[in-house]
Amino acid sequence: MLTLSEVEALARAAHEGQTDKAGRPYAEHLRAVAEGVRARGGDDEQIAAAWLHDAVEDDALTEAWLAAAALSDRTKAVVLAVTKRAGETPEAYAARVLATPGALLVKEADLAHNADPARLAVLDAPTRARLTEKYARMRALLGLAAPAERPPRNITRG
């Protein structure tokens, strides 16, 4: 099985040269999501999935690579669960995330970083408004409280 350090290195290499909407290296987002999963009590399989959460969706790695990778079946399932598919409705996407053990925590960390006010502040107003609404809708579909409403989480429970 790949170690977390190996998964991190693979994810960083797969997204090399890619930037986020604000022009920052994409690896910063991957690191933030992985750390968000860790802070929320996620286990190593979920942290590995966090590092890889956008790899298939962004065509940085293929589904065939993922299927053959030395990762747990759970990690692979979480990566596939959080991978958006062309033409998929937000409702269908949310249902798949909710139906996959471990995926909700990864998606929660992803949404938290995507909706970070500091990240959104550097975007133009229309993009910021569109993304804020998009992330709030997905949080609602997943049954997640808005970040300001979320009670403190006991990280030992996960």
Image (cartoon, rainbow, N blue to C red):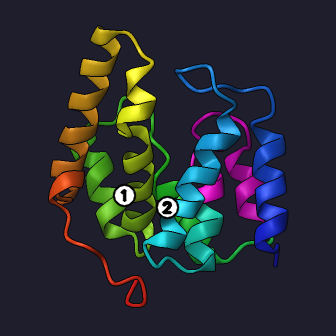
Helix, strand or loop status at disc 1? helix
Q: Position of residue 123 (x, y in %)?
A: 42, 16
19 left or right, relative to 39: right
Residue underneath mark 2: 36
Q: Residue furthest bottom?
A: 156
* Mark 1, other Cα within 10 Å: few <14 / some 14–19 / many ≥20: many
Q: Position of residue 96 (x, y in %)?
A: 34, 58
Residue type at mark 1 is: Glu
Q: Please, is residue 4 above or below residue 155 in the view?
A: above
Foreground pick, 72 / 35: 35
What distance separates the C-alpha of mark 2 from that of mark 1? 8 Å
- Give the residue drawn at x 56%, y 80%: 43
Residue underneath mark 1: 108
- Give the residue drawn at x 42%, y 72%: 40
Q: Please, is residue 118 above or below residue 93 in the view?
A: above
The stretch of residues the image draws in magenta is: 50-69
Determine whether label 2 and label 1 are within 8 Å by CB: yes
Foreground pick, 145 / 48: 145
